């Protein structure tokens, strides 16, 4: 339906983005924020047609898509407000001291935009992590042009959102080339974009294979660039014994809902649940099984994702000492529509020893699947934590006594994640300034940054220090009388 961009077309797009960068970077924080708010309005103006198109392309229900669209609009508006506040610029001023025995220079630091950012749309979030999603909003706030590589699985939805961005750009008198929407169902389009000399950063959400490839290309360039890839994770949940004594059934119900939400197609899906062998863990398994039996198989986003789910689940289930706890194969009557991409929720189990020695079981099975890892004791549970790779989140289901009595386990679990959850589920990522959506590799390629929350703006900016510049030649953000009224640290005081 949409033609792949050729290398010649991509070169033109990048030339225009580069030209636009030199105009947009000088625009005020207010102008950037007004543009972002205008995009939010234009997306709203797309009305129901946008939801209908996304429903057709992704198989996600209308309500879920409406909620995601609302979240996307909230992201644009709240990141705009944060952009305008100037807080993210991290402005610092250390004034000169000519009386010091070695005279101290005047030094003033702030963040400045990196340049054109290539954003890859995610399949599982057609709005919030795609065309006008978090990465795009952060890049615009930072002062960078954006080139979106549309996800081929929802290219028409992406096109509608791209038109909304372009309408907003016209209304706000933005420079040509500030935003471009690029189609490409072949990896060459992505490769050309990442390797282009005018590309200065990349934002990505998707598979490990895709993210790592883009990261490698970014690093192999003559001029390496940052590639912020969020590649998913298995989000381990540790069930501690005191908590399980009183709440095994409640915890099971909570987790059944989290594992199966949106057919398990979330990077925060709880893919590994770790407990201590006991009657309480048996209660947990029984209630979880009963709840999973109530969740009918449902259509996944597309046939590629369904095939991956089946392949990875079968591979995991075929491993030595892995057993199925429950699966629901009772297909609902959907006629022929999507009958061939219906995923059955599945829970497997294995021992901690087996899990630790078989790293294949640590890998994400993207979809409604989790494995329960049964430990003999707390020491074995700690060994599981110590052997897990980096994660977006990890969760403790624990009482205060559980936490006080298992300090080493708590430390080990904390050490592997970006968001450390107590008595909750990892699905549902709040968009706020304190959010950390990122974690040690392989969850992301840079654990120092977040892709959710306005703090994500910092990914697309770099610090620059001005030494001994007179006040009239400094950027407004760093002038003595603080004309923008932004928060700054002056001589070590906020
Ligand atoms: P994907 O394969 O990672 O693709 C995401 C985007 O990156 C697409 O636009 C894709 O472009 C591009 N891309 C991927 N590999 C590339 C490569 N080697 N070179 C250049 N561009 C590349 O993710 P997906 O299509 O959404 O789903 C595939 C699997 O990823 C799923 O089955 C699931 O396992 C996983 N996934 C994980 C998460 C998560 O958050 N954990 C989210 C979504 C998907 P093209 O389509 O044009 O190749």
Image: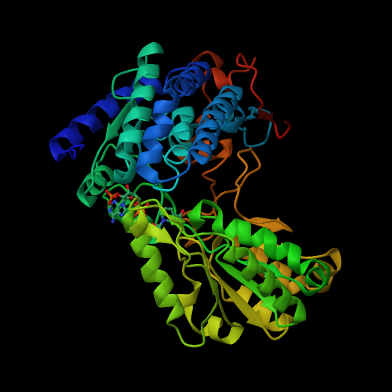
Instruction: Measuring from the top left, give residue 342's x and y in whole percent.
Output: 41, 59
Q: Which image quadrant is residue 154 in? A: top left
Query: In the visual, does 291 lie left or right of 227?
Result: right
Towards the viewer: 253 or 137 = 253
- Residue 371 appears in the rendering: yes
* Image quadrant where one finds the N terminus: top left
- Residue 116 appears in the rendering: no
Towards the viewer: 10 or 162 = 162
Q: How many marks?
A: 0
Query: In the visual, does 2 lie left or right of 490?
Result: left
> What residue do we see at 42% from left, 40% from top?
126
Residue 288 position (above or below residue 52): below
Instruction: Measuring from the top left, give residue 387's x and y in whole percent.
Output: 57, 76
> What residue do we see at 58% from left, 66% from top?
293
> What residue do we see at 43% from left, 71% from top?
313
Residue 170 position (above or below residue 290): above
Instruction: Measuring from the top left, give residue 344's x and y in whole percent.
Output: 47, 64
Residue 386 position (above or below residue 489): below
> What residue do we see at 84% from left, 64% from top?
400
* Image quadrant where one finds the C terminus: top right
Instruction: Measuring from the top left, give residue 333's x and y in whole percent.
Output: 43, 55
Query: In the visual, does 208 lie left or right of 418?
Result: left
Q: Which image quadrant is residue 392 in? A: bottom right
Residue 27 position (above or below residue 408): above
Q: Which image quadrant is residue 487 in? A: top right
Which color scheme does this rendered protein use? rainbow
Towards the viewer: 256 or 38 = 256
Query: In the visual, does 434 lie left or right of 361?
Result: right
């Amino acid at each position: 339906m949409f033609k792949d961009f050729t290398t010649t077309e991509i070169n033109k797009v990048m030339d225009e983005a580069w030209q636009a960068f030199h105009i947009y970077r000088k625009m005020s924080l207010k102008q950037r924020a007004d543009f972002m708010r205008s995009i939010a309005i234009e997306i709203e103006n797309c009305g129901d047609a946008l939801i209908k198109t996304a429903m057709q392309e992704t198989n996600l229900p209308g309500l879920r898509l409406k909620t995601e669209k609302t979240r996307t609009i909230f992201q644009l508006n709240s990141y705009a407000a944060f952009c305008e506040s100037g807080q993210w610029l991290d402005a610092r001023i250390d004034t000169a001291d000519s009386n010091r025995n070695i005279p101290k220079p005047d030094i003033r630091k702030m963040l400045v935009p990196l340049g054109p950012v290539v954003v890859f749309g995610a399949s599982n979030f057609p709005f919030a992590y795609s065309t006008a999603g978090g990465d795009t909003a952060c890049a615009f706030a930072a002062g960078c042009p954006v080139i979106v590589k549309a996800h081929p699985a929802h290219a028409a939805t992406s096109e509608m959102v791209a038109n909304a961005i372009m309408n907003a750009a016209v209304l706000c008198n933005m420079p040509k080339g500030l935003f471009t929407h690029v189609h490409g169902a072949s990896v060459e389009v992505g490769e050309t974009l990442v390797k282009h000399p005018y590309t200065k950063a990349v934002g990505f959400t998707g598979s490990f294979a895709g993210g790592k490839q883009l990261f490698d290309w970014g690093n192999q360039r003559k001029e390496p660039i940052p590639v912020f890839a969020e590649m998913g994770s298995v989000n381990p949940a540790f069930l501690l014994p005191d908590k399980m004594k009183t709440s095994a059934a409640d915890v099971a119900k909570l987790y059944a809902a989290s594992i199966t939400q949106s057919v398990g197609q979330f990077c925060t899906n709880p893919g590994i649940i770790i407990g201590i062998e006991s009657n309480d863990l048996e209660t947990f398994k029984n209630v979880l099984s009963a709840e999973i039996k109530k969740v009918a198989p449902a259509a996944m986003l597309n046939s590629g994702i369904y095939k991956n789910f089946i392949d990875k689940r079968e591979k995991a289930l075929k491993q030595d000492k892995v057993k199925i706890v429950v699966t629901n194969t009772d297909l609902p009557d959907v006629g022929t529509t999507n009958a061939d991409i219906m995923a059955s929720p599945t829970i497997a189990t294995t021992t901690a020893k087996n899990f630790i020695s078989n790293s294949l079981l640590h890998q994400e099975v993207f979809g409604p699947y989790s494995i329960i890892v049964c430990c003999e004791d707390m020491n074995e549970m700690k060994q599981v934590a110590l052997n897990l790779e980096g994660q977006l989140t990890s969760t403790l289901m624990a009482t205060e006594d559980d936490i006080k009595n298992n300090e080493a386990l708590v430390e080990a679990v904390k050490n592997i994640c970006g968001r450390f959850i107590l008595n909750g589920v990892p699905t549902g990522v709040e968009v706020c300034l304190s959010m950390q959506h990122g974690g040690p590799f392989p969850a992301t390629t840079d654990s120092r940054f977040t892709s959710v929350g306005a703090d994500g703006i910092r990914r697309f900016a770099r610090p620059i220090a001005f030494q001994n510049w007179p006040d009239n030649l400094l950027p407004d953000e760093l002038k003595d009388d603080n004309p923008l009224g932004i928060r700054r640290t002056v001589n070590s005081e906020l």
